[in-house]
Amino acid sequence: MFAQVFALGALLVVSHAQQDGLEWLGTFETLAHGINGEVYAEDDHTLVIKSFVYDGESEDAFFILTKTENVEEPFEYLADELGSKEPLGTYMNEDIRLRLRPGTTLADYKTLSVYCNKYKVDFGHVVFGKYPKPMVRSMVPLGKLTTVLHGVTGDVLAIDESTLLLKNFNYDGMSEDGQFVLFKDPSKINETHELLRDEDGTTNPMVQYRDMDVILSLKQGAKLSMYKGFAVYCAKYNVVFGTLVFPKRLPKMPHAVRRRSTPVALGQLTNGQVHNTTGTVFRVDDNTILITRFTYDGMSPGKSSSSETFRHLCNTHSRRVFCVCVCFCCWPLKENTAHTDTQTHNDKHSNPPFFLLHGC
């Protein structure tokens, strides 16, 4: 299906091993009961789990350590953060510290698991050091759009030196010739502006946007440093609907990796009344989708074959950008098509095609 998934807000780049003096060991593979969290070594005898999640619904779940990459006997039970070996309770995004028994070190073990002793079931595990830690690079905030007409609002960020992100962008769609533009002189936008293709790669008049995340790619060879600002502009009547003048000295930005195509908006993830799942889906290229403003409560047990496939893709290719037990279905990717009819172009935003997302 897809070889990579990027969660916007952080872009995956290179591996990094240390954080706050802790050594990265890995992220839990979620198998049941919403198990999730990042595992670190504080020292030879102490594990730290950050943002640990477990729904607490099993009557007989424990932390265990094994000496192989497989969750199998013989293994050793590990006391919880309170030093208790009672069944685990509920954890919701908590940071905890686990001490090994005296006389043992982390070098003696390969895997940490949350394990149901009664039914011999692995709810989730992490193999120490199997994958390098992904380091995130933050996007660069450039400022907020100044509203002039047509309800234009939103935050403007730079993903890299050739890509902009409009966060929570709004525009009423009532102009016959609204366009995204970059300009080189704030006082002469009509003379110095250049059209910027929309998120679908077209220069058609803009349609209505309601609290949307929009990715805009500059033309080949262009960089943000070549311009003084960004605007929503009507060239036909020389009217600015909303504008942002870039800071005089732009922060250093990540080098742009030119994609084969502009990210194309595919639609919104539908909640389906389960797991509070929302987000906007973009097609980046044949092997990559991008989900912006993604939310998911992490409580699915992940029993379906589709979710197993998706989780395997996350584990294998993107080293677990996030763990989601979901099914993508019901709407195939389509190649971008030009819209010559304004109403047809408008319909794709007012009633966009959907990925239907359901808890497993």
Image (cartoon, rainbow, N blue to C red):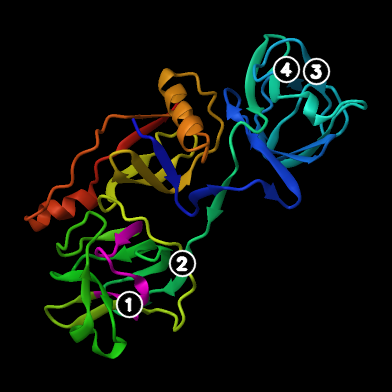
What residue does disc 3 label?
A: 76
- Nearest-to-viewer mark from 1 and 3: 1
* Residue behind mark 1: 226
Q: Is residue 185 left or right of residue 50?
A: left
**First in sequence: mark 3 vs mark 4:** 4
Q: Residue furthest bottom?
A: 187
* Residue drawn at (24%, 84%) of the image: 189
Local packing at callout 4 (Cα closer than 10 Å; few below 14, some 14-19, many 20+) is few
Confirm or deny contact between disc 4 and disc 1 (CB under 8 A): no
Q: Residues under labels 4 and 1: Cα distance?
A: 61 Å
Which residue corresponds to mark 2?
253
Q: Are marks 3 and 4 in contact (CB under 8 Å)?
A: no
Q: Are the two marked residues, 2 and 3, in contact with CB atoms closer than 8 angstroms? A: no
Question: Residues under labels 4 and 2: Cα distance?
Answer: 50 Å
The one nearer the camera, 259 or 183, is 259
- Mark nearer the N terminus (2 vs 3): 3
Q: Compared to 316, does 10 lie above or below?
A: below
Quarter occupied by residue 56:
top right
Is 9 colored magenta in this rendering? Answer: no
Upstream in the sequence, badge 2 or badge 1?
1
Residue 251 to residue 311: above or below: below
- Name the amino acid, label 1: Met
Residue picked out by circle 4? 59
Circle 4: residue type: Glu
Instruction: Note whether residue 135 is visible.
Output: yes
The residue lying at 45 percent from left, 39 percent from top is 277
Mark 4 or 2: the one toward you: 2
Q: Amino acid at mark 3?
A: Glu
Query: Residue 72 has which mark?
Result: none
Total numbered badges shown on the rendered structure = 4
